[in-house]
Image (cartoon, helix red, strand yellow):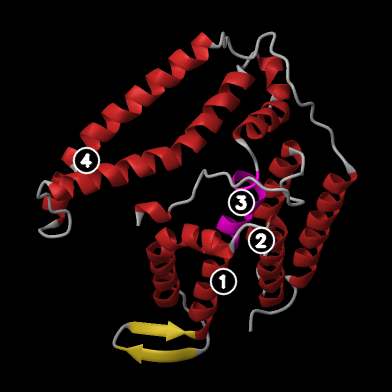
Amino acid sequence: MLSDITLGQFFPGNSPLHKLDPRMKIFLIILFIVTIFCASSLLSFCLVLGSAAFLTILSRIPLRQILKGLRPLFLIMLFTAILNIFWTSGENLLWQWGFVKIYAEGLWYALFMIVRVVTLIIGSSVLLTYTTSPIALTDGLERVLSPLRVLHLPVHEFSMMMTIALRFIPTLIQETDKIINAQKARGADFTSGSLFQRMHALVPVMVPLFVSAFHRADELAVAMECRCYHGGEGRTRMTQLHLSGRDYLFLFFMLALFALVLLCNSVSFW
């Protein structure tokens, strides 16, 4: 299960999404998230789902890799769907057993919530983390947050910290998987017993994981100091960011999608 988590991974490529300016990607993902949460009708959800599929095709990332990232969230989506099915009331009663009632509206809301979660994960991954290198992501975040320098905030350090934290997620996941396998080889059992016993069994995993994380952080700090890294002061960039016609074309596409979703919200759920 841990090996299925692809959050924070970067897949090098030469697709149109890979070539987008990282600043535009950040703006596009914000606009796409707003569009997803504004969708409230069947037609608007179809538009959002279709746009996520279109972005997936443009990214040229294997579909199995994207579906692999959705697999660990299956239980969360299932729990969300069950909550919406049994806690949403309406006018069209489908089934009743005692105080348990299932309405057609609950089924629709459960379906819409699953679609919303799936499109949110696919869109944010394909538009940002899967198609943006750590260096480009750091530069993009720094440029987007540059107005905060007026408040004397360490924008570069904050961007670097966020990028490093995001890119360390796959590394820590692999380390956790290795530690769990090593503990299982020594006779550890993580599947049987009560909930408290399972939590207690994770202690031999968490301790070496934290030690390994601190070691990696120390090694990274030493490596950055050896390369004379002193934050954003006086730093120059080998690659200068420039917006191109491709960036404005994707911006127009996302704005058109947002407008269409708002227009389609007038269509009834059912």
Name the amino acid, label 1.
Phe
Q: Position of residue 237 (x, y in %)?
A: 73, 20
Q: Which of 6 and 140 is in front in this view?
A: 6
Q: What element carries label 4?
A: helix
Q: Classify 190 as above or below 83.
A: above
Which residue, given by chain and number where applicable, does mark 1 sit on?
112
Query: In the picture shown, does residue 233 fall above or below 187?
Result: above
Q: Amino acid type of disc 3?
A: Ser
Question: First in sequence: mark 1 or mark 3?
Answer: 1
Count of numbered tags? 4
Pick whichever, 133 or 70, lies toward us: 133
Q: Residue visible at 56% across and 56% down? A: 121
- Report helix, strand or loop for mark 3: helix
Identify the disc placed on residue 56.
2
Q: How busy is the neighbourhood of tag 2: few (under 14 within 10 Å), some, or many (20 plus)?
A: many
The rendered magenta stretch, by its main secondary structure, is classed as: helix
Secondary structure beneath dot 1 equals helix
